[in-house]
């Protein structure tokens, strides 16, 4: 079968080459239509409750993200002038860009000041009444001469004051006092913020890009330096952050791919000392990658934050098949075989091992399909497909173009030696018999240590600190955008990113907040993750009838002859003070537009939206806090029996964390057993299966030991490196055993010198593919690279040193 197939490729190389060129061009054009979706909800299935809920909320409310313009200067009034001019320009934008703009709290401040006595609680209002009453009685007694000062009264009674009561509410209003002329200012008037609320969602990259570019262009046209020499502006908020992370993702993809191709090419060139070998293997793997992403565009239609980097990973691993084939082909050509004869020997000889490698790697990727996280399943599908198609390209595209190149210019000139003859493995194999006992003892000891480390590591292996997964530039703790966002956030009281819940009827709003507050109060104040639940009714004072009656009584204290003892100036001051106790009930119709706007839906309905604010004491960058917060808002049963479900970034992240915790062990075990099953089915012999599976077992245990030793935490991204390492790591044992089987007993040293060097190169190219991820700005991706590199090193060390040492001892 192989003879006929190889003869077909060799004789039909010209038409086949043309066919492959056409197929590559078509695949490349198809793959170019792939889009990248960076929203984290894309990592979960569309039928997840949290995804359905967030889509429902966005449909009713619109985008919940913001774009914030930060204006920094030494002169607050210059910032205000620039801000007003910018706001005037922003208001001219078409409605599809801006839903509302928030920049001034004057109307809110005036509303609350006019109605302040309705918003304080009854006990404090009663205390004000009682203090005033005692003060008036005291002054009356002084006028009659019957007052006896025993100096037992507190200062609030002797001199009427409500300062201590006002201080209780300062925390809620202190930020408003920092604002200048009502404009959102912080940092003692140096930093001003304008909040833009678009109608779209931040996950729409094209919309975010258009909006950010349009606002930047408007700012540039206004020229901030004209307003003040020190003035500079910046953009932050969810829309800017999503665009920043998306652009960082694109930059990382390009930089890692370019570096990967360059370093892999250099490694292959050093090993084979022939630029043609590099170009031929690169061409084969490029075909496999192009076919993979073309099929991905047809089947899935897009890439997410996890699958976007698969190009580098597939190149680094997919080239291994070509390395094995070309190394054997070159060995035969150097031995004097012609191109066709070399193909007839090298292709059948390497076929079983590379097929097993392709199958095990593809199966390891494919086990991710059983996970709930769509990002994982897509990664498994594309990665498994990519490895399979790179193998297909190795045994179709590579022989065709290799034969063509041989026809033009032979790869090997008989009788001519390479300029540099070397083998990395030669000096090592000479030492192997002498140190085999020590290697086995050391390997066994490290295996035991790794198991002990894993026992303590596994229960605390998940990453809950999301600050370690942020995008940041090299050498910086956080990105400039994140720093600006942190500065702007301090301008506003409370969280700027509350969870949004929507009800079907306004009658459900108050019971929903009551249920959330009930759950909140189950925890002690020190461990609570929720600050408050706000609805439109939160802006309506409680117990208005009782407060109105008490305010009327307080005003009566200041009426008529009871204040005859005051002089004219004092009476004028009392009249001003008395007006503060004039109040009328506040209804929904009385609320200013600045309060109503956040509660208005896209269709104009008002009041069915509820905001749940996290507390600063339990920040949601801590995954454990985030899960508790998500559990409270996710599902709430009302007294009527109705259930209100909700979603948001916190619920999406919590679902991803739970899916990793649930599916991680399952996918890992499935990958291990699936890979072992493939080996057993391909080789169908106990000795070979035991050799290869043993290589994988020790490599994986050592990998786990090093991960535990360096305390790498598992997150939603780097988890993928563990099951996929099973498929990639087992390749080395497969290739070493296949050559050992062909050469026979006593050949382990020769196997290591020949195939061992090629296996080492395979591992180097794979490590390069992962190493290039370390330059990424996405820290989750960097952690993926480190864990994958550790797995590669341990599996290679076992295949080239530990297991060969074991074979030597067994042969003796």
Image (cartoon, grey):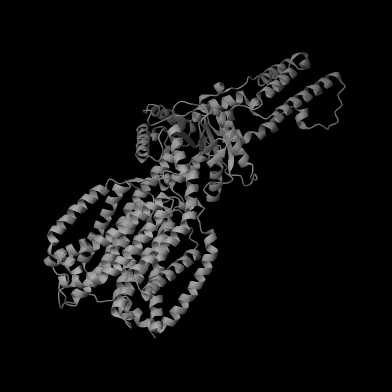
- Is 723 situated left or right of 389 in this image? right
- Is 501 situated left or right of 639 in this image? left
Rendered location of residue 211, percent (x, y): 37, 35
Give the answer, above or below, for where 106 lies relative to 339: above
- Is 722 situated left or right of 290 in this image? right
Give the answer, above or below, for where 39 lies relative to 391: above
Name the quarter where the C terminus is drawn: bottom left
- Is 775 situated left or right of 563 in this image? left
Q: Residue at x 34, y 50 (%)?
A: 251
Q: Residue at x 37, y 28 (%)?
A: 93
Between residue 750 and residue 640, name the one nearer to us.
Answer: 640
| Residue with the most extreme bottom position | 812
Between residue 262 and residue 62, name the one nearer to us.
Answer: 62
Q: Is residue 98 visible?
A: yes
How many numbered discs?
0
Between residue 417 and residue 486, name the one nearer to us.
Answer: 417
Rendered location of residue 43, percent (x, y): 41, 48
Rendered location of residue 206, percent (x, y): 34, 39
| Residue with the most extreme top position | 560
Name the quarter where the N terminus is drawn: bottom left
Give the answer, above or below, for where 443 lies relative to 85: below
Q: Is residue 494 visible?
A: no
Between residue 272 and residue 443, name the one nearer to us.
Answer: 443
Rendered location of residue 425, percent (x, y): 32, 76
Q: Residue at x 20, y 75 (%)?
A: 332
């Amino acid at each position: 079968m192989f003879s006929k197939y190889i003869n077909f490729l060799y004789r039909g190389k010209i038409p086949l080459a043309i066919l492959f060129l056409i197929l590559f061009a078509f695949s490349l054009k198809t793959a170019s239509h792939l889009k990248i979706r960076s929203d984290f909800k894309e990592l979960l299935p569309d039928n997840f409750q949290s995804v359905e809920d967030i889509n429902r909320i966005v449909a009713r409310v619109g985008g919940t993200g913001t774009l914030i313009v930060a204006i920094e200067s030494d002169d607050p009034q210059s910032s205000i002038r620039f801000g007003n001019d910018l706001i005037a320009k922003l208001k001219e934008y078409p409605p599809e860009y801006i839903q509302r703009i928030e920049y001034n709290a004057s109307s809110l401040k005036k509303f609350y000041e006019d109605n302040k006595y309705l918003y304080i609680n009854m006990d404090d209002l009663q205390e004000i009444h009682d203090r005033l009453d005692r003060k008036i009685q005291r002054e009356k007694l002084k006028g009659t001469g019957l007052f006896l000062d025993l100096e037992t009264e507190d200062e609030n009674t002797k001199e009427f004051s409500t300062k201590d009561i006002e201080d209780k509410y300062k925390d809620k209003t202190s930020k408003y006092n920092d604002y200048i002329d009502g404009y959102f200012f912080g940092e003692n008037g140096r930093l001003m913020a304008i909040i833009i609320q678009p109608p779209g969602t931040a996950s729409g990259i094209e919309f975010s890009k258009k909006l950010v570019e349009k606002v930047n262009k408007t700012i540039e046209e206004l020229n901030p330096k004209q307003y003040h020499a020190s003035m500079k502006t910046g953009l932050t908020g969810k829309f800017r952050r999503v665009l920043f992370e998306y652009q960082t993702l694109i930059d990382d993809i390009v930089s890692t791919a370019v570096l990967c191709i360059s370093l892999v090419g250099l490694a292959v060139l050093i090993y084979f000392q022939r630029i043609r070998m590099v170009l031929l293997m690169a061409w084969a793997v490029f075909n496999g990658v192009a076919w993979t992403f073309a099929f991905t565009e047809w089947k899935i239609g897009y890439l997410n934050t996890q699958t976007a980097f698969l190009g580098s990973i597939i190149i680094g691993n997919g080239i291994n098949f070509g390395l094995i084939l070309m190394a054997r082909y070159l060995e035969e050509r150097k031995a004097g075989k012609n191109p066709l004869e070399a193909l007839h020997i090298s292709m059948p000889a390497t076929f079983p091992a590379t097929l097993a490698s392709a199958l095990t790697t593809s199966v390891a990727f494919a086990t991710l399909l059983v996970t709930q996280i769509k990002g994982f399943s897509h990664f498994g599908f594309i990665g498994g497909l990519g490895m399979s198609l790179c193998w297909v390209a190795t045994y179709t595209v590579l022989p065709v173009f290799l034969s063509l190149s041989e026809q033009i210019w032979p790869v090997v000139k008989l009788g001519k030696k390479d300029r540099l003859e070397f083998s990395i493995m030669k000096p090592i194999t000479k030492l192997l018999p002498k140190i085999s006992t020590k290697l086995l003892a050391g390997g066994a000891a490290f295996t035991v240590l790794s198991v002990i480390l894993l026992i303590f590591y596994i229960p605390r292996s998940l990453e809950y600190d999301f600050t370690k997964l942020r995008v940041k530039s090299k050498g910086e703790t956080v990105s400039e955008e994140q720093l600006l966002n942190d500065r702007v956030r301090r301008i506003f009281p409370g969280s700027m990113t509350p969870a949004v819940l929507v009800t079907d009827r306004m009658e459900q709003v108050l019971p929903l907040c009551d249920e959330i507050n009930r759950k909140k109060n189950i925890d002690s104040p020190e461990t609570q993750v929720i600050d408050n639940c706000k609805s439109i009714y939160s802006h309506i004072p409680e117990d208005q009838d009782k407060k109105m009656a008490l305010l009327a009584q307080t005003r009566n204290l200041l009426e008529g002859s009871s204040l005859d003892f005051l002089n004219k100036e004092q009476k004028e001051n009392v009249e001003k003070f008395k007006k503060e106790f004039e109040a009328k009930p506040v209804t929904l119709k009385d609320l200013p537009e600045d309060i109503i706007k956040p509660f208005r839906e896209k269709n104009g309905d008002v009041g069915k939206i509820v905001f749940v604010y996290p507390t600063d004491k339990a920040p949601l960058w801590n995954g454990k806090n985030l899960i508790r917060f998500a559990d409270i808002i996710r599902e709430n049963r009302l007294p009527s029996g109705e259930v209100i479900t909700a979603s948001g970034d916190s619920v999406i992240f919590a679902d991803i964390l739970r899916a990793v915790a649930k599916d991680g062990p399952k996918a890992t075990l499935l990958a291990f057993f699936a890979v072992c099953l493939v080996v057993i089915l391909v080789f169908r012999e106990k000795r070979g299966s035991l050799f290869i599976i043993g290589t994988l077992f020790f490599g994986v245990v050592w990998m786990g030991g090093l991960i535990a030793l360096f305390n790498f935490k598992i997150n939603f991204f780097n988890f993928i490196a563990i099951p996929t390492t099973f498929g990639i790591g087992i390749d080395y044992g497969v290739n070493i055993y296949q050559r050992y089987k062909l050469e026979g007993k006593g050949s382990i040293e020769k196997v290591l010198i020949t195939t061992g060097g090629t296996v080492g190169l395979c591992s180097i190219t794979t490590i390069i593919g992962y190493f290039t991820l370390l330059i990424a700005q996405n820290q989750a991706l960097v952690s993926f690279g480190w864990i994958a590199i550790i797995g590669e090193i341990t599996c290679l060390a076992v295949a080239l040193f530990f297991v060969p040492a074991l074979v030597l001892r067994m042969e003796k």
